[in-house]
Structures are given as C-alpha cells and as structure tokens.
Amino acid sequence: MDLFILNIIKGIFNKELKHVEEIVGKGVVNRVFKCEVGEFKYILRLQNTADALTNYTKEEWAMNLALSHNINTAQPIALGVRDNFSFSIQTFIEGFNAEEYEDQVFVWRELGKIAKKIHTIQIEGFGENPKFEKNPNGHASWQDVVYWFEDRLSCDNLFLKFDIFTQDELEKLKDLIPVLLNWRITPVLCHGNLTPRNAILDKNNCLFVYDWGTSCGFPKEREFAEFVAWDVSEKHQEAFFEGYGYSKEEYKKNKKSIYILAIMRLIDAARWGIEHKSDWRKEDFVLHAIKRVKELLSNI
C-alpha cells in the first residue's frame, strides 16, 4: 500500500513522499492517510472502487462552497482514480480531533455557529446527491429526492425479504411519500454529519469541520435530523442550538418534519449497510438505524 500511495503522491505533486501514516478508527467508508510531501502535510482518502469518485467530487464541491463563505475546513487539492481506487487529497489541518476535547458543550456550541454559516449557502440541487456543475445527473428537484426515497424503500423488497420491517411498518413508511411530495423545499447546503468526530480543534481552539461525504441539499432541519437519527444527547443538542440560535419553539414547530428527515437518513444508512457489508447483522450502525426507524414511526 505504501508504494501505491507513493505513486499517487508523486503523480500529483511530482515530489517524493517523505512519510505516510494511516489514521485508523475515524471512518466506516474510507481509508485515511496523513502524508508528508516536502514541507507540507496532506490527507489522502482512499476507497477501493472507482465509483467513489462521484462522492469525492461532491465533497470537493461542498468544501469549495464552504471556503468561499469563510467556513473553516480543509482545502481540496486533487481527485482521481488509480488501479480502481478512488482517491481524494486535501490539506492537513493541524490540531486534534474535537471528540477528544474535554469541554464537549463548547465544541457543540461552536458546531452550531458553523452550521448557521453553512446554511446561508443556497444551492440548486437537492438531497444526498444534489445536482451541480460536475454532477449533472444529480437530483435537480425535490420530487427526484422523494422518488429516490421511495425506491430505497421498495427496491427488491429488501427490507421485507430480510424481515427488517413488517408489512405494516413498510406501509407507514410508504405513507410518507405523499406527505413529502407536498413539501415546498428551498435547499441550502447541509454538512450532513456535524459532530465532534468530524471536527478538528487547532491550538487556538478554533474549530474546523471536515468529511463532507454526507453533504446535501435540504432545508436546514436536515442537519438537526442527524441528532434525532443518531441519539445525540439532549445537553449537546441544547449547546448546538444555542450556538445556532434555533429556539425550542422553532424546534417544536418543525419536530414532525425533522423526524421524517431523520427516517429518510436512517433508511438510506440501513440500506447502504445491507448492500455493502458482508455481515450487516453485526454492524452497529445498521442495527441502530433499523431500531430508530421503528421508534420514530411510532412518534409521527
């Protein structure tokens, strides 16, 4: 693998790779490496499929949008495919993972402030696969997203075949389709997974966000749906909303929509895990997604 990485780096920078170190335990999808090239450090992310280049292209688009609005994140450097591996290179952010910081309330409050800035960025594309210049086949309308969600529910009867959801539960999920089609959406950029795990604190306690693989075009409540989907503690949610300036009254008003957006996210995560993991029944994130969908269905 070191020789493979060396060839990628030399092809991009025309310089020798001084040192490479794999960063483990921070992702489900990517292999991540810190690379020293001359005087500079970079992050190299790899996936062992050429198809992953589409998602890396979306990340590059989202990071460039964020940087253009003075949001702290990494600078994308290069994308490509080599020997059927997709790769993405971006600048290395000096600091430590914000998940390790003692004052997590501070981190969540800062994430709220960053989210507020991200959500000022209006985009034209919709959903998890938004249309933009380098992604012309992405979703160009809200209806595209709703029909994509319907397909994720129904394609191959996967959820029924594996006894994941009952017929009644699937009917309740399908009943969301006409509700969603009645929504009128003006999409903004959402990071899609704003947590301390995806943030770096520098020596000045300045927060940088990274890993834009789940970036998407939704109403801002899609960002909050992530907390509902993955059980972020109430204390940390309150800190986030304080930093964001999102009131309890506004949250209560939009609670049903947030729950529905969380269900959409969880269905996609569950299906992805079932399709891509050889023994998905042992994957905590898949089991959690299925369990959480069942819980949310009973509350909407």
Image: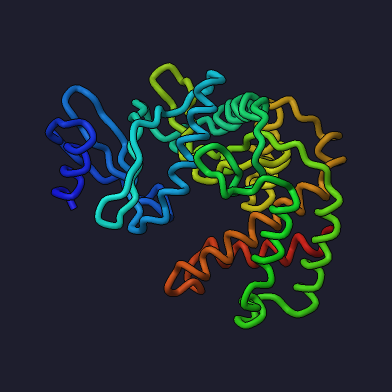
Residue drawn at the location 52% of the way across and 21% of the way down: 68
Give how far across and how far down residue 171 sits, in percent: 80, 73
Q: Residue at x 31, y 36 (%)?
A: 43
Q: Which residue sits at x=79%, y=67%?
A: 174
Front residue of this view, candidates 163 and 240: 163
Q: How is the image coloured?
A: rainbow
Q: Is residue 146 left or right of residue 214?
A: right
Q: Is residue 181 left or right of residue 238?
A: right
Q: Is residue 14 above or below residue 69?
A: below
The front one of 180 and 42 is 180
The picture quadrant where one finds residue 123 is top right
Residue 197 can be seen, yes or no: no
Q: Position of residue 73 (x, y in %)?
A: 46, 27
Q: Nearer the viewer, residue 169 or 49?
A: 49
Looking at the picture, does residue 166 appear above or below residue 48? below
Work out whether 222 lies above or below 206.
Answer: below
Residue 38 seen by the camera = yes
Report x, y in % for residue 184: 83, 43
